[in-house]
Amino acid sequence: MERLKGKKQIEKLFVSGRSVGVFPLRLVFLKTEETNKVGVSVSKKNFKSAVNRNKIKRLLRIAVENHFLDLFNKLEPKYCMMVLYVGKEIPKAEELDTQFKLMVSRFNKKVLDEV
């Protein structure tokens, strides 16, 4: 699993990607020919302090590792994904964990509907 970087890739993801939401998370994804790539983002508008934004991003990366790693090995078409945190309060790790489980199940459902 690689990090999603590059302005063109991220722009393409947001223009033509699909999304799944479970408050306070939103997942935007797009099929790609390359390897699986994941990015995380936290709004500067909601969290002025870089310390808080970085803390939330760290929690998101850990959750992505825990929940998407097995899924990525099973997925045949490769995907680019961006996990966005859209809440206004700093989350607890346990809350993020439950929300991620729900988001992964919704993502699976949407991907299986495509096939």
Image (cartoon, helix red, strand yellow):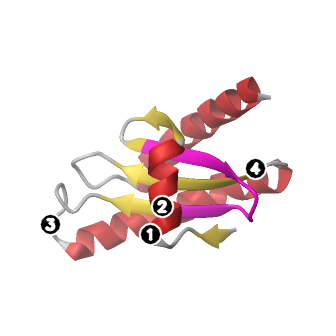
Report the Cα–Cα distance between label 2 and label 4: 21 Å
Q: Amino acid at mark 3?
A: Lys
Q: Is residue 94 visible?
A: no
Residue on which the image places disc 1: 7
List x then y, in percent, for residue 17.
Answer: 53, 43
Q: Amino acid at mark 1?
A: Lys
Kindly give the residue lying farthest to the top in the view shown.
113
Residue at 48% across, 61% down = 10
38, 49: nearer the viewer? 38
Report the Cα–Cα distance between label 1 and label 4: 26 Å
Quadrant showing the N terminus:
bottom right
Residue 28 covered by magenta stretch: yes
Q: Amino acid at mark 2?
A: Ile
Q: Which residues are magenta?
A: 26-39
Q: Secondary structure at mark 4?
A: helix
62, 108: nearer the viewer? 108
Residue at 28% across, 45% down = 87
Q: Amino acid at mark 4?
A: Leu
